[in-house]
Image (cartoon, grey):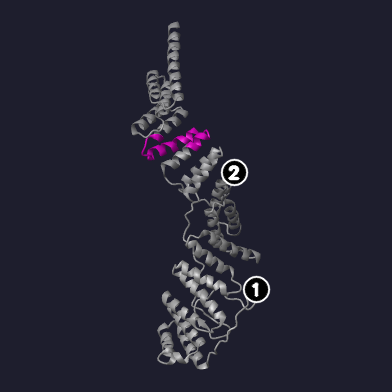
C-alpha cells in the first residue's frame, strides 16, 4: 500500500568547484548557480545601475595566482596568496570590487574543504561590499541560499532565496523547486506545492519535460491534501515520462482511494503482466484485489507463482490467502496443502479450525475432525460453534452418530448467534430421524 511516509527529498542543490565569470570581470571561484541572473529585460523591475570600480592589473595577477593554486587543489598556497593581499595595510589599498573577488575566492576555498560556515561568512563579505556588479551580488545570494540548504538550515535558506527572487528578473524553474523543497522541509506544504507547480508549468510551457523528482514532490503534496485526482494525474505523467514499477502500484492505490476498484485492479494487473511486481506485499495486494473482484482463480495463481519464485514471504497469512483463493475457485485439492502450511505456521488454533472445513469439503472427514480438535485445544478459534459444526458433520459422514451428536450439542452450547444454535438443533433432529429410519430398515429386514 502506498503510505504517506516518503523518503528524504534530494535537494536540487548542484555544487561545483568551477569558476564563473561575472560580467566579463575576473573569474570568481565558488558555487555554480542554476539560477543565473538574466540581463536587463526590465520585465520584473528596472535594473539599478552601479558604478563598479575597476579591477587593477596587479590585483588581477595576484588573484590569478591564487586561482591557479585553487585549481591545483593547493588550498593552503591559495589562501596564503589571499592572506598576503589583505595583510597589514593591503586591505585598505583594495577597492570594493577587488575585495569582493578576494572574499569570493576565500569562500570557494572554505567550501572546498567543506567548511560551509566559513564559506557563508566570506560570501556575506562579498555581498557587503558596495558597488559590486549587480550580477555578482545576485549570483552570490543564490549561492548563499544553496549553502544554507546544504546545511539543512531551511528557514535561513528560504529567506536568502526570497531575497534573491527580489533581485533577479527571471527566476528559473530550478529556483522555484529549491524554494519548494525548503518549504517542504518546514512542513509548509501549501507554499511548497505552489512553488513546485510554478516550476512544472514553466517547463511544460517551454515544451520541456519536468524532472521526475519535481513530479514526485507534487504528487506527495497533492496526496497530503487528499487531492487524489491531481495526485493521480501527476502519477499518469510519471508513468508516461518515467515508467517505473512503483508508479503503477501507487496509481492503483489512488484509484482505490477514489473507489474505482476496476481501475485499481487493472493498474496492478498491468504491472504484474510486465513483470514489475517483485515484492511480497505487491503480490499479496494483487491477490486480494482479485478476490474482491470475485475472480479467485487468478488470485490463487498469483500466490502460487509467488511462492514458486520465492517472492511471497513464508508467512501463515500468505498461505491462508492462497488456500482461501483456491477454495473459492473450487480447487479443494490445491487449497488443502496451502491451509496445512498456514496452520502449521500459526501460533493460534484458528487456521486449524478453517483447515478442518477444507478437509470436510475434500471428503477427508477424519482429518477434518482431527484438525478441528487440534484448533480447539490450541485456542484462539474465533467461532468455536462453527468449528464444532464442522466436526459434527464430519462425524456424521463417517457414520459416527454419537460423535456427531456430541459435537452438535457442543456447538449449540457455545453458539454465538441463534442461527448456529438453530442449525445445531436441526442436525440433532436429523441424526435422531436418521437413526430411527435405519432402525426401522433393520427391523423390517
Q: Position of residue 310 (x, y in %)?
A: 45, 48
Please identify the dominant SS of the magenta region.
helix
Q: Dot 1: what SS?
A: loop
The vertical placement of 2 against 429, above or below, is below
Q: Classify 10 Å Cα crowding around label 2: few (below 14), some (14-19), many (20 and above).
A: some
- Nearer to me, 230 or 282: 230
Q: Is residue 348 magenta?
A: yes
Q: Classify 10 Å Cα crowding around label 1: few (below 14), some (14-19), many (20 and above).
A: few
Q: Dot 2: what SS?
A: helix
Q: First in sequence, mark 1 or 2: give its number.
A: 1
- Nearer to me, 344 or 9: 9
Q: Specify whether residue 114 is in view.
A: no
CA–CA distance between discs 1 and 2? 50 Å
The vertical placement of 65 against 236, above or below, is below
In the displayed structure, does residue 398 sit left or right of residue 49? Answer: left
The vertical placement of 69 against 159, above or below, is below
Q: Position of residue 151 (x, y in %)?
A: 44, 69
Q: Which residues are magenta?
A: 324-351
Q: Position of residue 128 (x, y in %)?
A: 49, 81
The image quarter in which residue 445 lies: top left
Q: Position of residue 172 (x, y in %)?
A: 59, 70
Q: Specify whether residue 47 is in view.
A: yes
Q: Is residue 392 magenta?
A: no
Q: Which residue is mark 1?
A: 43
Which numbered circle lies on residue 424? Answer: none
For the point 43% across and 85% down, the residue is 78
- Nearer to me, 140 or 167: 167
Residue mark closest to the camera, 1 vs 2: 1
Which numbered circle lies on residue 262? Answer: 2
For the point 46% across and 81% down, the residue is 125
Amino acid at each position: 500500500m502506498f503510505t504517506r511516509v516518503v523518503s528524504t527529498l534530494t535537494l536540487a542543490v548542484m555544487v561545483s568547484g568551477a569558476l564563473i565569470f561575472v560580467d566579463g570581470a575576473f573569474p570568481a571561484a565558488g558555487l555554480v548557480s542554476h539560477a543565473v541572473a538574466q540581463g536587463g529585460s526590465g520585465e520584473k523591475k528596472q535594473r539599478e545601475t552601479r558604478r563598479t570600480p575597476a579591477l587593477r592589473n596587479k590585483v588581477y595577477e595576484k588573484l590569478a595566482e591564487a586561482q591557479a593554486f585553487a585549481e591545483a587543489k593547493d588550498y593552503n598556497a591559495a589562501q596564503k596568496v589571499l592572506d598576503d593581499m589583505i595583510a597589514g595595510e593591503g586591505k585598505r589599498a583594495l577597492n570594493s570590487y577587488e575585495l569582493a573577488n578576494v572574499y569570493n575566492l576565500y569562500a570557494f576555498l572554505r567550501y572546498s574543504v567543506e567548511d560551509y560556515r566559513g564559506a557563508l561568512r566570506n560570501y556575506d563579505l562579498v555581498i557587503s561590499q558596495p558597488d559590486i556588479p549587480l550580477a555578482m551580488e545576485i549570483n552570490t545570494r543564490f549561492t548563499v541560499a544553496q549553502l544554507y540548504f546544504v546545511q539543512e538550515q531551511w528557514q535561513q535558506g528560504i529567506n536568502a532565496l526570497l531575497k534573491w527572487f527580489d533581485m533577479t528578473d527571471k527566476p528559473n524553474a530550478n529556483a522555484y523547486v529549491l524554494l519548494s523543497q525548503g518549504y517542504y522541509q518546514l512542513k509548509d506544504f501549501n507554499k511548497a506545492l505552489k512553488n513546485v507547480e510554478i516550476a512544472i508549468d514553466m517547463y511544460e510551457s517551454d515544451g520541456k519535460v519536468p524532472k521526475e523528482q519535481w513530479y514526485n514532490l507534487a504528487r506527495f503534496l497533492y496526496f497530503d491534501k487528499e487531492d487524489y485526482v491531481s495526485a493521480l494525474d501527476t502519477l499518469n505523467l510519471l508513468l508516461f515520462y518515467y515508467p517505473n514499477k512503483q508508479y503503477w502500484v501507487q496509481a492503483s492505490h489512488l484509484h482505490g482511494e477514489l473507489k474505482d476498484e476496476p481501475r485499481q485492479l487493472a493498474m496492478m494487473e498491468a504491472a504484474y503482466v510486465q513483470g514489475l511486481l517483485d515484492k511480497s506485499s505487491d503480490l499479496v495486494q494483487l491477490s486480494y484485489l482479485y478476490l474482491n473482484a470475485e475472480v479467485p482463480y487468478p488470485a490463487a495463481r498469483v500466490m502460487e507463482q509467488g511462492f514458486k519464485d520465492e517472492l511471497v514471504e513464508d508467512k501463515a497469512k500468505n498461505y491462508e490467502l492462497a488456500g482461501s483463493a483456491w477454495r473459492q475457485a473450487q480447487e479443494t485439492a490445491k487449497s488443502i496443502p496451502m491451509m496445512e502450511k498456514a496452520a502449521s505456521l500459526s501460533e493460534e488454533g484458528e487456521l486449524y479450525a478453517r483447515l478442518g472445513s477444507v478437509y470436510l469439503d475434500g471428503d477427508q472427514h477424519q482429518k477434518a475432525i482431527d484438525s478441528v480438535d487440534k484448533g480447539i485445544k490450541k485456542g484462539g478459534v474465533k467461532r468455536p460453534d462453527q468449528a464444532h459444526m464442522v466436526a459434527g458433520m464430519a462425524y456424521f459422514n463417517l457414520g459416527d452418530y454419537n460423535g456427531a451428536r456430541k459435537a452438535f450439542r457442543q456447538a449449540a452450547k457455545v453458539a454465538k448467534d441463534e442461527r448456529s444454535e438453530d442449525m445445531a438443533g436441526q442436525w440433532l433432529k436429523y441424526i435422531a430421524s436418521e437413526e430411527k429410519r435405519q432402525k426401522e430398515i433393520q427391523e423390517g429386514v
